[in-house]
Amino acid sequence: MTEVAHEPVFLDGDVVECEPLSHGEVVAPHFHDFGQLRYAVSGALVTTTEVGTWVTPANRITWVPPFHVHSSRAHGETDIRLLRVPADRAGQLPAEPSVFVASALLREAYLALLGDSDQGPRARLLLDVVLVELARAQREPLRLPEPADPRLKAVTDLLHANPASPATLTELGRRTGSSERTLSRLFSGELSMSFHQWRTLLRVQRAVLDLAEGASVTDTAMRLGWANPSSFIEAFTALVGQTPGRYRATARAGRG
């Protein structure tokens, strides 16, 4: 997991793309006075803000609104293309960070816009196409809420480090110095979900990354701590809206 620091860096540069990131490489917490779209041509990007974590495989586009502090971690060898959205156009997109499914038209307009250096009428038209397509695009539901309370954060940090851990909330409480009752109350009050729901969502997020990289459904289920593939398929389908097998097929096709 990438943590959001208390004193993030303000970046005001006109950067539209960055160098490829190696697996596990971290981009430190920062923010901009413009909006930013982030598309992984290869690999995947995990974006963390103060309120949640989003995962972006190669067929998704992440939106970060102006002034939202965010940090990133690469999953696999990641070639990420960044697109600046002027503040006066950012209101056409959600007020909170979001992940969108990228259609073929959206991908092509996005990449063509990055290749247009003169920022003339063609670039403005391409940006219009990108924003209209994003407004029509399906939004990825997998936002993992992140806690502010240090007692709860100690537990979620352990789970981020090992999503497959079978430890109960009581056992995790012993390791972090909090009672099961306190932690259960914090999960419900701060994150609006139970410990079991949060860990399941974390595991499904990680599964999205593995499936997009081509891992099998069975291997993914076993690696992330499910007792059997059937229980994994049930949990994944309930949260993502499609089976892991179908998600894997469409994610791999999105790389073409």
Image (cartoon, rainbow, N blue to C red):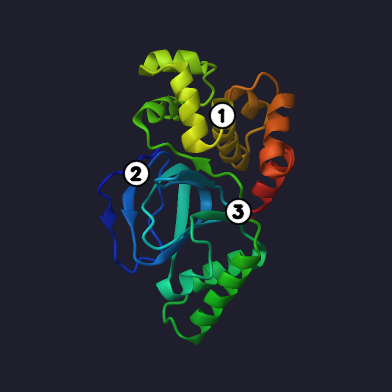
Residue situated furthest bottom in the rendering: 121
Image quarter in which the N terminus is found: top left
N-terminal of the pair, mark 1 or mark 3, is 3
Left or right of 230: which side holds 145?
A: left
Evaluate if marks 1 and 3 touch, with contact meaning CB atoms under 8 Å apart: no
Q: Is residue 37 above or below residue 202?
A: below
Q: Secondary structure at mark 1?
A: loop
Q: Tell me which amino acid carries mark 3.
A: Asn
Q: On the image, which quarter does residue 210 sit in?
A: top right
Q: On the image, which quarter does residue 126 sit in?
A: bottom right
Q: Tell me which amino acid carries mark 1.
A: Ser
Percent across and percent down for residue 248 are 68, 42
Residue 162 in sight here: no
Q: Secondary structure at mark 2?
A: loop
Evaluate if marks 1 and 2 touch, with contact meaning CB atoms under 8 Å apart: no
Q: Is residue 211 above or below residue 40?
A: above
Q: Tell me which amino acid carries mark 2.
A: Val
Q: Nearer the viewer, residue 151 or 71?
A: 151
Q: Which residue is mark 2?
A: 4
Q: Secondary structure at mark 3?
A: loop
Q: Which residue is mark 1?
A: 194
